[in-house]
Amino acid sequence: MSTIASVSFINKIKGHLELLDPVTWISVFPCLAAGVMASGAMKATVHDYLMLLALFIIYGPLGTGFSQSVNDYYDLNLDKVNEPTRPIPSGRISKKEAAWNWGIVLVTAVTMATWLGMHIGGQRGIIFSASLFSGLVIGFIYSAPPLKLKKNIFLSGPAVGLSYGFITYLSANALFSDIHPEVIWLGGMNFFMAVALIIMNDFKSKEGDAKGGMKSLAVMIGTKKTFLVAFAIIDSVFAVFAFLAWNWGFHALMYFILISLAVNILIQVPIYRDPQTGASFMQYAVDDGFGNAIGKSEVHAHNAFLRFQIVNNSLFLINQFIAAGMIGLKYM
C-alpha cells in the first residue's frame, strides 16, 4: 500500500509540474538574457548573479508556468479534443488541485517581484515590478473568462507578444540599469515576432478551435493565407532590424541580418506553396534534433511551422544576441 501511495504521490507531482509546462519556460529566457546584456551594467559578482537567477525564476517557472497552468484550468473542454493527455482532461489532476497549482505560483511570483522591485528601488524598481504584474494579469485574462483574450487572434497575438517579447526586455534592462532606447526597439521587434509565431502555432489546435468558437487566424482565413500574414510580419521585423542595425552603426550586423532574411524567404516559399511537404529537408531536425524542445505534431501545417521555426528562431536569436552585446558594450 505504501508503494502504491508513493507512486500516486510521484504522479501527482509530475502532473503539477506538467501543468506548469517546463518546455515553455525557455521561451522567455532569450529576451531576458538579451535585455541584461544590452543593459551593459551587470557585474561578475555574487549579488548580480543571484539577481539574474531571480529574474529567470520569476519569468520562467513562475510567470510562464502560471500562464500555462491557468490556460489548462480554463481550457479543459478544448483540451479534451486537442490534448486529451494533459493532466486535467486525463484525470491525473483535478480542477481544484489545478487551481491550487496556479494560485500558489501566482502568490510566489508576486512576492518575489515585489521584493526585487523594492531591492532595485526608484523608477527602475517600479518598471520591473509593474512589468511583471502586467504579464501576470495578461497571462490570466488570456485564458480566463469573461475576456479570454485567446478567443480572438487580434487580442491573443498582441497579448503574447507583450508578455513574452516586450516586458521581458524592459524587466531585464531595468534590473541593472536605466532603460536604453535600443532595448525598447529590440523589445518591439520581439513583440511582433511573437505575434507572428503564435499565429502559426494555432495550426495545431485548428480543429478544436473551430469547434469551440475560437477565432484563430487559421480558422478565419485558412492555412495558406495565415502563413502569408505571418511570413510578412516576420520579414518586416528582419527588414526593420537591418535598418536599425545600420542606424546604430552596426554595419556588419546589418549585412548578416539581410542574409538571415534571405535564408528565411528561401524556407518560406516552399512552405507557403505546400504546407504539407514544403521544406521537408528540415523534418529530420524536428524528428531527431529539436523535437523535444519545440514539440512534434501530426498536423501538417503545424509541422511545417515547426520546420520553419528552427531556422527562423535560430537566425533571429543569433542576430538578437549580437545586437544586445554590442548595445551593452556601447553603454559600459
Image: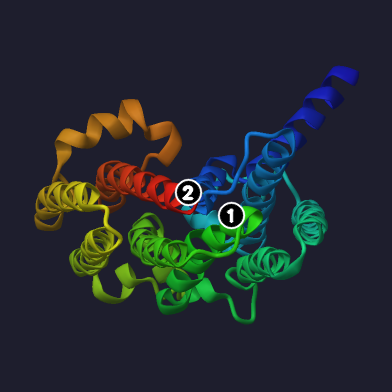
- Label 1 amino acid? Ala
Q: Residue visible at 31% across and 34% down?
A: 286
Question: How is the model colour-coded?
Answer: rainbow
Q: Position of residue 54 (x, y in %)?
A: 71, 45
- Dot 2: element: helix
Residue underneath mark 1:
172
Residue closest to the eye, 95 or 157: 157
Give me the residue at 18% from left, 50% from top. 264
Q: Which residue is mark 2?
A: 34
Q: Amino acid at mark 2?
A: Ala
**Nearer to me, 210 or 181:** 181
From this viewpoint, is residue 73 visible?
yes
In which quarter of the view is residue 224 placed? Answer: bottom left
Question: How many angstroms separate mark 2 from mark 1 (CA)?
Answer: 8 Å
In the rendered structure, are the residues bearing label 2 and label 1 in contact, judged by CB atoms less than 8 Å apart? yes
Mark 1: secondary structure: helix
> Which residue is rendered at x = 67% and y = 37% of the image?
49
User: Residue 109 location in percent, x, y?
Assistant: 76, 55
Q: Is the residue marked by circle 1 packed among few (<14), some (14-19), or many (20+) residues within 10 Å? A: many
Decide which of 109, 114 is in the foreground and name it.
114
Residue 102 quadrant: bottom right
Q: Which mark is residue 205?
A: none
- Residue 1 visible (yes or no): no
Question: Residue most toward the right?
Answer: 2
Provide residue 90's location: percent of width, then percent of height.
63, 45
Residue shown at 77% from the left, 51% from the top: 101
Disc 2 packing (10 Å; few <14; some 14–19; many ≥20): many
Percent of width and height locating residue 298 = 33, 43
83 to the left or right of 1: left
Viewed as shown, does residue 93 lie left or right of 192?
Answer: right
